[in-house]
Amino acid sequence: MAASNQQPITEQSNPLSSYIDIAGPLDIISTLESCDKEIFDGWQDFPGLFDERIQTNLCKIVKTAANILKDPEKSAIIISGCGTSGRLGFVTIRTFNALLRERGMPECYQYIMAGGDKNKALEKAAVGKLHVLFIGITCGMSASFVAGQLDYCLQNLDRFTPVLIGFNPSYLARNLPIQNWNKTFLQVVQELELAESRDQGFLLNPVIGPEPIAGSSRMKGGTATKLLLEAIFVPAHSIAFQDKLQVSSREYLELYRQVWKAVYQQKSAIADLLKLAGMSLQAGGSLYYLGYTSHGIMGLIDASECHPTFGASFDDVRGFLEGGYSTLSNTEGDLSDLGKYYRISTEDFLQFVLPSVSEKDLVVFICKEIPGLINRKLYEATCKKSCIIVSTGKGPAVTEESEVFAATVHIDLSSLSNLPVLVADGIWAQVGVMCSELAVKWTLNAISTGAHIMKGKVCSNIMIDLKVSNVKLFHRAVSIIQRFSQLPVEVCREYLLRSLYNTDDLTEEIQTASVAQHIQIGARQDRVVPTALLAAVSGCSIAAAKMALQDQPIVRQAVLTSLQHHSQAQVKIG
């Protein structure tokens, strides 16, 4: 299998979302609906979720997992990933370890998050285990952390069954040298494919199409990761403890297609909430998620992703969970002493955040029914309040408290219980929870993505408002300006420097300074790339670009307004 210079599908721009930056709230939701549909329908002619090879591999992995569950003391299931992949791996092990505890059995699920020595982390997790099912997750098939662990498993196939979850064709796995190592990710994938031919390892890489925001794998990639993990472990538990397969992986994946339909049936209500969130961010306010049980954990995950995805402040979107770390059940325990952003309980919100909220802010409750608000102070607070309710029964009752919500989204999953094929009773209740988690994920992803689009973080479907805080991001900023302006790279670099230093006259000292010096300035600046891009495309001054973006944060709209003002030819972005 030869390497390819083709751009990975997970990094490509999705044609369906090329104009999402200038869409209204309802059209943003409709665009996301169309992009998410590709998870189930597939993309172009590539093998998708229901491809025969993917389904065959799923069945084999289910049997491997079921055998481990029958002997949890001597075996282990280890899930490893970076970013969203690692967080969803954690949610998975939390769910299925709880099911084992309910049966009075030892926990056998473990998770590894990126960081530290990859092989030592795996060795430590697998110590004393005779058989380990290892699942490494990297949506773009590029994370060196996962590559190293897969390679370790491939060298020890007598104990390990390695599985890779990713969403590119195998030939598009990253083929760049990895520091201090003699292999590329592509070479590891090629070795895994050889192991797959002997049923000693497996590749789960359905192609689900580009993300609605290019490269933002928290969205479709995160959703498909959750689908695949649960499509392995729900049937595996059913086999291990019921001695017969109650529902196949294929049927389970079809169940999630119904969840997708149920979520987007509420697109109008979601759009109303998106608009409120966008208005809060535009006004300099914050978006706060207050959630309960695993719904609240999905809120924590969505909030944590906004900083790396959109270059957002840690204060822009924050999540809080009833019970905090006790409910989260993370391995590290209570981390609240590390600083304010580690204070995640609803009690922390009441004590440290509520006293300073204003009418600019939006609080979103995530729950199974309309809540009695936490206390009177929150009831009377000037911030806007809204609610996301995911239920499996009749609609929520209207209470006195419900009148305070500026927007309410109710997603009804009650029809899921009418499926002709039911999972075993012990699993079915948890399956309902997992379905509601996915509904919450889809809803929150839509709201936070749309809100940041309204704030001007996106041009076409590319995130452009990044912090120029390291060498990699400096060069990415130049490439973004070049992509949309079609100007020579050196000219784009000059526009970036003009924006960084807030001047149209670059001195020789600025022009000859190192990138390291530039990023010291960039780390403290906001809206550097949008300002540079607007100036480059419209030919206006840096001061004029900044003023234009204050009036119109959407870069494409600001460009058109600026060009009309200067009576220049219209430039197309998209």
Image (cartoon, rainbow, N blue to C red):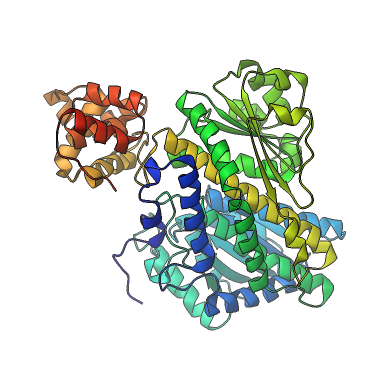
Residue 403 is left or right of residue 9, and the answer is right
Nearer to me, 450 or 309: 450
Residue 384 coordinates in the image, percent (x, y): 61, 25
- Residue under the image location 69 percent in, 26 percent down: 404
In the image, residue 139 sits, relative to residue 456, either above or below, namely below
Question: Do we see residue 535 in this rendering?
Answer: no
- Residue under the image location 58 percent in, 32 percent down: 318
Residue 356 lies in quadrant: top right
- Residue under the image location 84 percent in, 63 percent down: 426
Residue 273 coordinates in the image, percent (x, y): 57, 37
Residue 420 lies in quadrant: bottom right
Nearer to me, 492 or 411: 411
In the image, residue 197 sits, relative to residue 551, either above or below, namely below
Residue 149 is left or right of residue 569, and the answer is right
Residue 295 is left or right of residue 88, and the answer is right
Residue 331 lies in quadrant: top right
Q: Which residue lies furthest to the bottom in this view?
A: 198
- Residue under the image location 49 percent in, 29 percent down: 279
Question: Do we see residue 265 in this rendering?
Answer: yes
Residue 392 coordinates in the image, percent (x, y): 76, 53
Q: Which residue lies furthest to the right in this view?
A: 104
